[in-house]
Each structure stands twice: as structure tokens, then as C-alpha cells.
Image (tube, grey):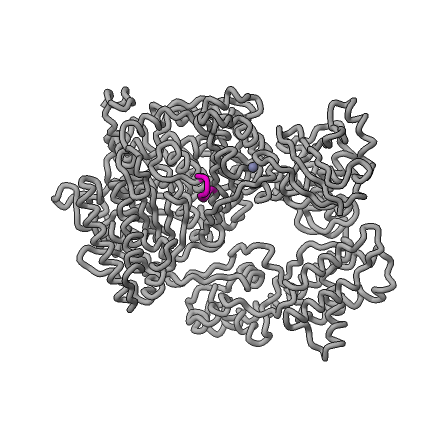
């Protein structure tokens, strides 16, 4: 049916215009999530990285941010912090950075608290208003512990980061379980066409469209969608092979040759594009529709199996889909069809065949969800839209199990627990940045046990005053962390292997001490980009966030994600 | 305090640069043994004259980072004016700046925020400037979204190298982003792999065949391209399409929509129309910050030797960044190509069908990832085969277009392909299959 009235024109709103380039990445739903967020930055030290991170969140329109920082703006701040100016000298850094950040986007609310964290944290529920917390090193480990305990209890993401000289680090604790439905997988890897397990409706459509294939005109023959061609030749193959589909590489190659032989070569173009597409698709699309290991992991998790009345809706849907999977041996059909050579009408019909099957599967899952809701006595039903999104991306959902990050204290061993073996084996990798991570742990222990005026005031960074002495102390601390890790992992390294681990660790330590606590603006900007990007993922629940630690080495220009 | 502010010279107290000076005055475990930190390094940095190409998403970040890394003499070129859709990432611009030239506004803002830095803007095209202009800089940092402009500056800098004059070698540091992905690379013209050597890393997207648009559309994008390429020519031939004019986009949108209705295709929206017609690439502040800062980090290391930079011969010169699925970088050495049309000296071997017409051969030049030429002209050592201009020569050589390659050339003969957009001569040795 063609409508006769012209559609109303819906030009973009002024907000859509301003945010056009990012809405193409996270859509209106992601933008709404950003606008609902309130980020707290607990700033300290030279404090550039946190402010650079906020810059990249204010620009895309985060709802609210608050800077907690009791420092007073010094001359040295003006040499590294772009969000301070001459007039800021002597004022509170929280106030002035907040003011200049707010200028970037009038739609964002900025707040500041110029109170020391030590007293702020003792107030009545001081962290409650915030949805995500950013913590800059150095910080008193007791306070960092309080913040992470709050985050664990309230399932709030918390980030902890360092920026010293050419290096940076950040760790994320995303909450105990952090599921993501909208992972935005690469479109090349997502088409799920069910060629090995076609449903009757699809086979029927194939039969209808391939009747008298050999007698068709060149034009018609050259426009059969490749999906139907593969199905057609599969049926033929099955007839010759006891009803079995090609199972291994060799059989798939033989099958591909059979498809190739069906192509007409006498045509004007010397071949047929649809056959070329079919031939190219054979190896990658002849796979049984089994769920990925990541999805099976979700189905196996306790949260999925043991639903409660107040379980997050994600788990209710996950449970319903796991039932579906158990019964049918396949996930709900996503329903999208890649573009392919075809007549317009045939392609649209093919799309509809997939869409209606996807709709059927979705309806089945919805009724399962509703039954679960009844059984659990849940009062607010999960939105259809949420169930639909889950069905469409079922094979690409991701579950991140958050792990609290290390809080290193002077006089205490760093504990690696169940990650000890993995971390210890990373030590032997000469390219790994685990050695840099250890150098930052040593940095925390050093600052925790040294203060600038020896009166319990601001922490002293290694190398700020005595390069030589601090270098030796830092190396000593770092070596001890290495040794403790090896002991905890029950791993023995000796001779050259052990020396290599130590010398690599020492180089990172020396480069850190060289900086004497100084931040380089470039490294702060770069790392502020990384952290803001991860905040956006955590807030929008789109794309896949870092799990759980990211290192940047600006000497060699490399990053590495470590799961610690 | 005022005293400190007035004197930015090396001898004045540098309380402001306390952080930077730690790195500039101390050796590290990776610095060269012969490197002498201190005053000379500080002075060398403040004397470095650096050119920034582009004052957009990357450019804003680059200007800010260079100014806060101790560079004092910065120049910036950009021909664009500020659009409202820039404001979600180009943080040196405010709503009241919309319509103003980017280079001027960006330069003024950073100069005001970071006293002591001089930023000289030029509003115009890089092609407006000649070698004399580019010769004054120590290095060039590029934050562009156009491949054409990158290729132009790359070949200009390669051509400028005089082996007897080390000052003629200008390191080129280039950044690029697309959504959550990007790259930063360092090029030492003639010494290491250049932008042209790396061109196949940025292959153009395959175009939808015209017959699909004209007869068998299947996707909403096909309907939009049909309105854009076919319908506009048919109905509004005398009007130059301006993709920034809302009336034009609306017209295309409505044409695309009605065509989609006719074929039962869903999904045409205004935003998609704009995206397809303007070839919009998603862009966010965070990726720009990452890539721009990586470029500036390399520029800083090159200017100060405070640590080894990317791009040294035999070392890594390319950092690929991807941030949509966790975070991933791949830092590697892209090798220089002997048959690079810009920095190599050997003709590239190309297998072709001898019965291909010259016209289809030239059309294939547009899609070849290593060439991407839209208006190619071609000559052999013996004769001119086809020239796009001047018109008289075009007319004279046009009949050759219909001839087969084997009629025009010997097997194994070398041809030179050029394009007015670049000063590059592509040398191919054509081998008939
Ligand atoms: Zn080259």
C-alpha cells in the first residue's frame, strides 16, 4: 500500500544538530543515559587527568558533574591545566576548573566542593547523589576503601587512576555483575542466517523462488538472493549425503565447488554476482546456530538461574532466553539480513521471512518472561523493547564480572588472590605492562608513607625531591611486590628470567621517579580520552568496557588491558 | 607574580613550568646517553616552529596540547568555518562563534588561555601555500578528515627533502579518527614509510553499483543515493547541491522516502539522508583527545628527545587505536614501499587484461586502494594517452579511451598516471595477463 499523503517532515532539533556526530554512535537512548548521570570527580595531586576526563564528558552532554578538590590554584597548575587561567591563581581549583568546564556546554550542570576529602567522607551518606565516581591518585587508602565499599554496596561504577610523566593507569570496578546487551558488534560478524537449520517458512520461500532454476532466464538466474542459492544447493547436497549437511572443511570446500558449478559463465559480465556472493559466504555461514561461550556463561551464572522477585530485568530475560535455548537448541533469530544482489521485491520478501520468524521467537520469549514475572510476583513488567533488544543481540551480549581493584598500603602485602597465577605469568612477558602496573602500586605505597612536609599533610611523590634516594626506595618496594606475587602464585623464577623481570620493573620505576609526580599534559589528555570513553560505555551500557585495568606507556605508545 | 608572567624566557623563574621541567631537566632510563637535559632542551623546544594542519576536532586538541607542552611558536591552517555540529567536541568554540573561521577563533582562544604562546592562524587551503612557507617549520602535525589533503601535504614534504640539507626534512605527524577508532603515525619524509605507502590502510568504501540504485534498490541507503545521484540531476540540474542547505537535504529526503515507499523499503530518515549525502563520519571528543594527544606526545618527544619517538628508521611508526570493544592498540612499523609513487623509485607492477579499454582502466584507478584517483590522466614514455585538461588536449586524446590497452601499449611498458588533486606521479609497469 502506498500512502497518498506526503509524510510530515521531521528535521533535526537543535539538540540533535549539536550532538549529531555522537548520536550516530550511541543513539537517543545512550544520550538520555548520559543526561541522567551525575559524575563525581575526587581530584588530587596535580589533578589534570580528572579534569581532562570531565572535559570529554561535558562536551557530549553528561547531565551533572561535581568536582571535589580542596587544592588552591598554584602557578604550576597553570602550566598543565587548560581549564584554569591567570584569574584562577590563589582560588579553589575545584571552583575554577568547574567554571571553565561548564563553559563548554550550557546544557551541563557543574558543581564543586572545595572541602578536603578527609572531612567530606565522614558526612552522612556523602556519595549518595552520584551515579559514578572517578578517583585520582594519590589518595589515602582508607578513603579509597570507603569509596569502593560504597560503590560495591550500591552497584555504582568507580574508576581509580594515575597519571605520572609518560605513563598512566586506570582501573574500573563496574559492580559485581555488569551485563551489556547493546555491545555494537562488528556488522560483518553478526549475520545469523540459520542456513544449516532453516525453518519451514524459509525453505518454502526458497523452493518457490528456485523452481526451474536451470531453465530461468539469465536475468532471473543472476538475481536469486545468495541465501536462497545456498539453501537450494544444500538441499541437493543433503539428498546425496544421507540428509547430512557439509560438516567439515573438506566437505564445505566440495559443497562450494558444487555451488560454483551452478553459476552461468556465458553471461555478458562473464559470471554472476549472486553466485560470487554465495561462494564467498559458504565457509563463514555454514555453522550450526550454537550460542557463543560468552552467552553460555551468562546462562550458567547464578544470577540467571536463581531469579528473585527483585532481580534486575536483564536476568529475567536471560532466564527466559536460556529456556528457549535449552528447548530449541538455538537462540532467538535476530532477523536481520545483509544486503545482497537481488530484485527489490525478492529481497524485501526474504527480509520479511526472516523478520516474521524473529517476531515469532520474540513473542515466545515474551510469554516466557511474563510467566516468570507471574511466578516471581513481579509487579512491573519488563518492557517489550528491552526483550526485543535482547533477542536481537542475544549472541553478542556480554557479562562483565567486576572485581574490586588493588588498594595498596604501606606495610601490607599486595594480594592478587585468584588472579595471582595469571599476573605472575604476565611478568615473564617482556612486552607486558604488568611491570608498569606494579610500579604504580609501588607509587601508591610510597605516597602513602611519605608526605611533603613530614607533618601528615599532602603526600610526597617519589622523585619530587630526591631522585636517587626515592629511586632506590621505589625499586625496593616494587621488587617486593614482584616477589610477593611470585610467592603467592607459587612460581619460581631465577637467573636471567628473574633478572629480566626486575630490570623491566626498574625501568618503569625510574621513569616514574624521573617525573617526580609531574603530569604531562599530553598524557593527561590521552588518558582523559580513554577514561571518558569508558565512563560513556559504563553509563550508556553500550559497547564493551575495559575489564578491568588499562595501562598506557607513552614512551613506546602502547596500551594494554590487564584483567587483574 | 607579575614578574614571572612577563618573562617567559629560560632565565626567568619557571614556576609555571614546574611539571614540564622535571622531564626536560632529568635523564630517564630510555633517553639517549649523549642527551644533555636542561636549558638547551628548554630553549630548543620554545624555538621550535610547528605547523598544525586542521583546527577541527583533532586540531583544537592539538593546539591546546602543544601550547601546554612548551611549544611557543605555533601556526595553524584551516579553511573551514564553525558549524553547530562541531560543538560536541571542538571545545575552543562556543555557540556565538558559529560561522566564524575555525583557525582564527582557535588560535585566539589558546593564546588567551596560555599566555606566552604565539599562534598564527591562516584561513585557507594548504594548497594556497608553497614550499617556501612549509620550509620555515621544524615539523608538521596533521589533524584532518580528508585523505586528499593528507596526500597533498605528504607529497609536498617528500619533494622538499634535499639530501644535503638536514633542515629540509620535516617530520610529519598525522592523526585520524572515526567513531571509537583512530590512528597516530609519524613519518620522516623519504626516510620512513609515507602516507602514500600506507594508503591501502584506508581503503575507500565500495560504491553501490549505479544499476542497483536505478533499478533494484534494497536498502534505505540505496534510495537516498538514488535521490542524490540520479534524481537531483534529473530535476534540479541547474542548482548546485549544497549538502549544508536544509532545503536541499529535505528535498533529497522526501524523494528518497517516496522511492522507499514504492519498493516497501523501511528506514529512510532525515538523519540517515544527511549521513549518506554528506558522508558523515561519527566523531566524539574522547577519541579526538586520544589521537591528538598521541600525536602531540610524539611531537614533544621529537622536539626534546626526552624519550624516543615513533617513526625512527627501523622502529615503530604507527599506532592503531580501537576503543569500541574494550581498548586495543597495535603499534608497529609500517614498511616503506620501493614502488611508492611518492617516496619510492620503482614502477609498481600491475597485471591487467590487455583487452581492457583505457577508459575502464582509468575508472579502476578510483577504486584501487593504493591509488584512489578520481580524475586521472595517463601517459606512457612514448606518448600522451589521455589528459583531463586542457580541453584541447582532452578532446585530442579522448578517442583513446575506447581503445584497448594492448592497442596503445606494449606488454611491460611503463605508464605515468597523474591527478590534478595531487602532485603525485603514479608509475605503473603494465603486464598483460
Ligand atoms: Zn611512500
Q: Residue at x 73, y 57 (%)?
A: A276
Residue A286 x, y percent position in the rendering: 65, 67
Vertical position of residue B222 compared to residue B171: above or below: below
In front of the other: A8 or B375: B375
Q: Nearer the viewer, residue B361 or A374?
A: B361
Which quadrant would residue A402 be assigned to in this image?
A: bottom left
Q: What type of secondary structure mainly makes up the magenta span?
A: loop
Q: Dividing the image into four equal quarters, which quarter contains ligand 1? A: top right
Magenta includes B312? Answer: yes
The magenta segment is B311-317
Q: Name the residue at 55% across, 64% down.
A: A395
Of residues A56 and A2, which is closer to you in this image?
A56
Question: Where residue B26 appears, x then y in whole percent?
Answer: 26, 36
Image height check: is B5 above or below B224? above
Can I make out residue A466 in this image?
yes
- Residue B315 is situated, as x and y percent measured from the top left of the image, at 44, 43
**Viewer can see residue B97:** no
Q: Residue furthest left?
A: A455
Left or right placement of residue A139 versus residue B119 in this view: left
Q: Quadrant of the N terminus of chain B?
A: top left
Compared with residue A479, is residue B212 higher up or lower down, i.e. above or below? above
Rendered residue at 30%/56% (across/down):
A501
Quadrant location of residue A91?
A: top left
Amino acid at each position: 500500500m502506498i500512502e497518498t499523503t506526503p509524510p510530515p517532515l521531521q528535521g533535526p532539533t537543535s539538540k540533535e544538530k549539536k550532538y549529531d556526530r555522537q548520536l550516530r554512535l550511541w543513539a537517543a537512548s545512550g544520550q538520555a543515559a548520559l543526561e541522567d548521570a551525575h559524575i563525581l570527580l575526587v581530584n588530587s595531586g596535580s589533578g589534570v587527568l580528572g579534569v581532562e576526563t570531565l572535559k570529554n564528558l561535558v562536551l557530549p552532554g553528561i547531565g551533572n558533574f561535581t568536582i571535589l578538590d580542596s587544592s588552591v590554584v598554584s602557578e604550576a597548575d597553570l602550566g598543565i591545566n587548560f581549564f584554569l587561567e591567570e584569574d584562577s591563581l590563589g582560588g579553589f581549583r575545584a571552583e575554577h576548573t568547574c567554571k571553565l568546564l561548564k563553559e563548554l556546554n550550557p546544557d551541563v550542570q557543574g558543581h564543586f566542593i572545595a572541602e578536603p576529602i578527609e572531612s567530606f567522607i565522614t558526612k552522612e551518606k556523602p556519595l549518595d547523589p552520584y551515579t559514578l565516581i572517578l578517583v585520582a591518585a594519590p589518595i589515602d587508602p582508607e578513603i579509597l576503601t570507603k569509596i569502593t565499599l560504597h560503590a560495591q554496596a550500591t552497584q555504582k561504577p568507580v574508576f581509580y587512576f594515575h597519571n605520572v610523566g609518560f605513563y598512566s593507569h586506570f582501573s574500573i570496578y563496574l559492580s559485581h555483575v555488569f551485563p551489556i546487551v547493546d555491545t555494537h558488534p562488528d556488522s560483518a560478524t553478526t549475520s545469523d542466517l540459520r542456513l544449516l537449520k532453516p525453518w519451514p517458512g524459509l525453505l518454502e520461500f526458497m523452493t518457490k523462488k528456485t523452481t526451474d532454476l536451470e531453465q530461468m532466464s539469465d536475468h532471473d538466474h543472476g538475481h536469486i538472493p545468495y541465501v536462497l542459492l545456498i539453501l537450494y544447493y544444500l538441499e541437493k547436497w543433503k539428498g546425496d549425503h544421507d540428509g547430512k549437511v557439509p560438516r567439515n572443511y573438506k566437505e564445505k570446500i566440495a559443497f562450494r565447488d558444487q555451488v560454483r558449478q551452478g553459476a552461468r559463465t556465458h553471461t555478458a559480465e562473464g559470471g554472476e554476482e549472486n553466485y560470487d556472493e554465495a561462494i564467498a559466504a559458504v565457509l563463514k555461514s555454514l555453522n550450526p546456530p550454537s550460542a557463543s561461550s560468552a552467552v553460555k556463561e551468562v546462562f550458567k551464572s547464578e544470577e540467571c538461574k536463581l531469579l528473585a522477585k527483585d532481580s534486575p530485568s536483564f536476568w529475567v530475560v536471560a532466564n527466559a532466553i536460556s529456556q528457549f535455548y535449552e528447548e530449541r537448541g538455538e537462540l532467538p533469530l535476530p532477523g536481520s539480513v545483509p544486503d545482497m544482489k537481488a530484485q527489490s521485491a525478492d529481497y524485501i520478501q526474504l527480509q520479511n521471512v526472516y523478520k516474521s520468524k524473529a517476531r515469532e521467537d520474540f513473542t515466545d520469549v515474551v510469554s516466557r518472561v511474563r510467566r516468570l514475572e507471574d511466578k516471581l510476583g513481579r509487579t512491573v513488567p519488563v518492557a517489550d523493547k528491552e526483550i526485543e533488544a535482547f533477542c536481537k543481540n542475544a549472541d553478542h551480549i556480554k557479562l562483565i564480572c567486576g572485581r574490586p581493584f588493588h588498594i595498596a598500603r604501606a606495610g601490607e602485602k599486595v594480594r592478587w588472590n585468584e588472579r595471582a597465577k595469571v599476573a605472575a605469568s604476565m611478568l615473564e612477558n617482556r612486552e607486558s605492562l604488568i611491570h608498569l602496573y606494579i610500579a604504580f602500586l609501588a607509587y601508591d605505597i610510597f605516597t602513602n608513607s611519605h608526605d611533603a612536609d613530614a607533618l601528615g599533610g599532602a603526600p610526597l611523590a617519589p622523585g619530587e625531591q630526591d631522585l636517587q634516594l626515592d629511586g632506590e626506595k621505589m625499586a625496593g618496594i616494587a621488587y617486593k611486590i614482584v616477589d610477593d606475587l611470585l610467592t603467592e602464585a607459587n612460581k619460581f623464577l631465577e637467573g636471567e628470567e628473574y633478572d629480566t623481570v626486575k630490570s623491566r620493573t626498574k625501568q618503569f620505576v625510574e621513569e616514574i621517579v624521573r617525573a617526580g609526580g609531574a603530569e604531562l599534559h599530553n598524557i593527561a589528555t590521552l588518558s582523559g580520552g580513554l577514561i571518558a570513553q569508558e565512563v560513556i560505555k559504563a553509563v550508556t551500557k553500550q559497547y564493551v568496557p575495559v575489564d578491568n585495568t588499562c595501562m598506557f606507556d607513552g614512551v613506546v605508545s602502547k596500551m594494554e588491558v590487564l584483567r587483574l | 607574580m607579575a614578574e614571572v608572567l612577563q618573562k617567559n624566557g629560560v632565565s626567568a623563574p619557571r614556576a609555571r613550568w614546574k611539571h614540564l621541567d622535571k622531564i626536560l631537566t632529568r635523564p630517564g632510563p630510555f633517553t639517549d646517553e649523549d642527551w644533555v637535559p636542561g636549558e638547551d632542551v628548554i630553549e630548543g623546544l620554545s624555538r621550535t616552529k610547528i605547523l598544525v594542519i586542521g583546527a577541527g576536532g583533532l586540531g583544537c586538541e592539538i593546539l591546546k596540547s602543544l601550547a601546554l607542552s612548551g611549544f611557543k611558536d605555533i601556526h595553524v591552517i584551516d579553511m573551514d568555518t564553525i558549524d553547530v555540529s562541531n560543538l560536541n567536541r571542538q571545545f575552543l568554540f562556543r555557540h556565538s562563534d558559529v560561522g566564524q573561521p575555525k583557525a582564527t577563533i582557535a588560535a585566539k582562544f589558546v593564546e588567551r588561555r596560555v599566555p606566552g604562546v604565539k599562534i598564527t592562524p591562516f584561513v585557507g587551503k594548504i594548497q594556497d601555500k608553497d614550499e617556501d612557507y612549509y620550509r620555515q617549520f621544524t615539523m608538521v602535525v596533521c589533524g584532518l578528515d580528508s585523505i586528499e589533503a593528507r596526500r597533498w601535504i605528504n607529497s609536498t614534504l617528500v619533494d622538499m627533502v634535499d639530501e644535503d640539507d638536514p633542515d629540509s626534512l620535516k617530520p610529519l605527524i598525522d592523526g585520524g579518527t572515526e567513531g571509537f577508532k583512530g590512528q597516530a603515525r609519524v613519518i620522516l619524509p623519504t626516510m620512513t614509510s609515507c602516507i602514500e605507502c600506507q594508503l591501502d590502510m584506508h581503503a575507500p568504501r565500495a560504491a553501490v553499483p549505479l544499476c542497483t540504485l536505478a533499478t533494484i534498490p534494497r536498502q534505505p541507503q540505496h534510495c537516498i543515493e538514488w535521490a542524490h545521484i540520479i534524481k537531483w540531476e534529473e530535476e534540479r540540474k541547474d542548482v548546485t547541491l549544497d549538502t549544508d542547505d536544509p532545503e536541499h537535504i529535505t528535498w533529497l529526503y522526501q524523494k528518497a522516502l517516496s522511492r522507499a515507499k514504492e519498493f516497501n523499503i523501511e528506514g529512510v530518515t532525515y538523519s540517515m539522508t544527511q549521513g549518506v549525502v554528506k558522508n558523515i563520519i561519527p566523531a566524539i571528543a574522547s577519541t579526538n583527545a586520544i589521537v591528538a594527544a598521541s600525536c602531540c606526545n610524539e611531537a614533544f618527544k621529537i622536539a626534546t628527545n626526552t624519550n624516543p619517538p615513533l617513526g625512527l628508521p627501523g622502529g615503530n611508526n604507527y599506532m592503531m587505536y580501537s576503543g569500541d570493544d574494550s581498548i586495543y592498540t597495535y603499534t608497529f612499523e609500517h614498511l616503506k614501499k620501493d614502488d611508492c609513487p611518492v617516496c619510492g623509485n620503482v614502477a609498481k607492477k600491475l597485471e591487467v587484461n590487455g583487452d581492457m579499454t583505457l577508459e575502464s582502466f582509468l575508472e579502476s584507478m578510483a577504486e584501487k586502494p593504493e591509488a584512489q584517483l578520481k580524475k586521472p590522466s595517463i601517459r606512457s614514455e612514448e606518448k600522451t594517452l589521455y589528459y583531463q585538461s586542457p580541453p584541447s588536449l582532452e578532446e585530442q586524446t579522448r578517442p583513446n579511451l575506447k581503445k584497448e590497452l594492448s592497442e596503445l601499449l606494449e606488454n611491460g611498458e611503463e605508464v605515468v598516471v597523474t591527478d590534478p588533486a595531487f602532485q603525485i606521479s603514479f608509475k605503473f609497469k603494465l603486464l598483460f595477463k
